[in-house]
Image: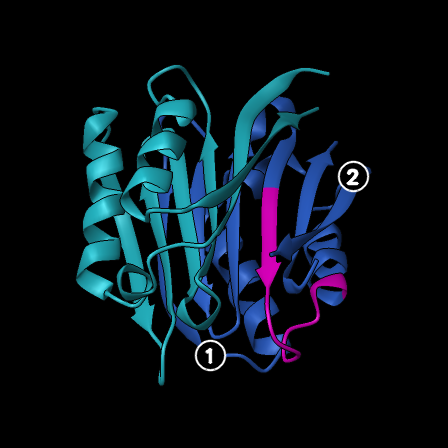
Chain colours: A blue, B cyan
Amino acid sequence: MRTMGRHFLLDLKECNKDRLDDLDFIKDVLHYVAKDAGNAVIGESFHRFLPQGISGVVLITGAHLCIHTWPEYNYAAIDVFTYGDLFRPEEAAKLIIDRLESGNPSVVELKRGL
Amino acid sequence: MRTMGRHFLLDLKECNKDRLDDLDFIKDVLHYVAKDAGNAVIGESFHRFLPQGISGVVLITGAHLCIHTWPEYNYAAIDVFTYGDLFRPEEAAKLIIDRLESGNPSVVELKRGL
């Protein structure tokens, strides 16, 4: 297989519930991840649902980040998809786990390609 | 495991190269998928790279769609992440494969949750 992209799937349990429902905080985390990797954010979209929960996507040069949060379960599903060498998904995953204070993170890496 | 989301990973080989590099076409496909599922598009971001290739993300009520295309390899990596019952990811996957004319599609379904 020719690897075109590296895809990290983060299933983060036992997160900080308040952080999972704080739209500005979630935005800041994903922007910080992009900035930390030295990459430009091309576009983004975020939404806070009622009564709770946030969905967001950020398109970055060489990557995308997606998040869906369920504060009521202290759970978030996050995707870090990268291609090229600029973006280090391991660092991004660690940073997100740390910021969301997950006490029980699961990280799976998949290779994407042909 | 409590399933919170269904995540379909599409690795589409042998696609129509021209379609993979047509920004309007790719946008239309993802919007059609959202509309076909009766769901509202909350936000989106698309970018065409030079000399070729498109990245795009669409945030939908109950789902997100992401695409990265490599026309030079006739290849596209697509993610269909859904939660709730409104969005039928199998139908979305079939429709995308059909529109991109993939002669060699790979579809993997993962459960996301805690």
Of the 4 image quadrants, the one containing the C terminus of chain A is bottom right
- Say which residue label 1 marks: A40
> Is residue A54 depicted above or below B48 in this figure?
above
Sort mark 2 into few (<14), some (14-19) or many (20+) by Cα contacts within 10 Å: some
Q: Considering depth in this image, is B25 or B19 the residue closer to the camera?
A: B19
Query: Which residue carries the number 2 mark?
Result: A106
Q: Chain of mark 1?
A: A
Is residue B92 something that shows in the picture? yes
As drawn, B109 above or below A44 = above
Answer whether residue A51 is visible to the viewer in this image: no
> Which region shows up in magenta?
A78-90
Question: With B2 as the anchor, is B65 left or right in this view?
Answer: left
Using the rendered image, report if marks 1 and 2 lie on a common chain. yes
Whether residue A14 sits left or right of residue B104 in the image: it is: right
Decide which of A55, B70 is in the foreground and name it.
Answer: B70
Residue A85 in the image: above or below residue A59: below
Badge 1 marks a residue whose secondary structure is loop
Give the percent coordinates (x, y) of residue A58.
44, 59
Left or right placement of residue A77 versus residue B40 in this view: right
Instruction: Please report the residue visible at 48 percent of the width from the left and 35 percent of the height from the top.
Output: B81
In which image quadrant can residue B95 be found? top left
Three-letter code, disc 2 = Ser
Image coords of residue B40 (percent x, y): 21, 33
Asked if the magenta segment contains residue A86, the reply would be yes
* Earlier residue among tags 1 and 2: 1
Residue at point 70%, 64% (across, down): A89
